[in-house]
Image (spheres, rainbow, N blue to C red):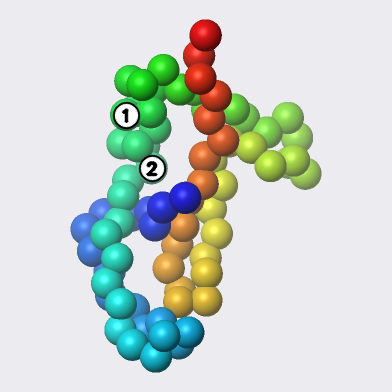
Amino acid sequence: MFKNGRGVTTVYDRDYGVERSFQLYDEQEILQVMGDYGLSLVEAEDPNVLGGVMYFTDPKPVDHCVFYLRKIS
């Protein structure tokens, strides 16, 4: 899981009561690096199943990205 985008973002984190800065990462660049390490994306078999590239926003609000990857044998 990582915060997706480019550059750095600063947001108010109400859980900690402070401004926090986060490094952002481009999901396509990370997928390329993971592929270089022999991992491949596992797509969801249907829209009701977790898989592939998934996005969500937490309460900060900062966008996040999660991958399902598998080692290519």
**Residue 32 appears in which quarter of the rendering?**
top left
Farthest left residue? 7
Q: Residue at label 2?
A: 27
| Residue 10, image x, y percentages | 28, 75
Residue type beneath disc 1 = Val
Amino acid type shown at disc 2: Glu
Residue 59: x, y in percent? Answer: 52, 76
Left or right: 46 as drawn, with respect to 36: right
Residue topped by disc 1: 33
Question: Residue at coordinates 26% horizontally, 54% vertically from top-left?
Answer: 6
Q: Residue 21, percent across and down?
A: 27, 72
Residue 65 higher or lower than 72, as above or below: below
What separation in Å lies between label 1 and label 2 (alpha carbons)? 10 Å
Q: Secondary structure at mark 1?
A: helix
**Label 1 vs 2, first from the N-terminus:** 2
**Label 1 crowding class (10 Å Cα cut-off): few <14, some 14-19, many 20+?**
few
What residue is shown at x 51% (from left), y 46% (from top)? 66
| Left-right relation of 65 to 23 | right
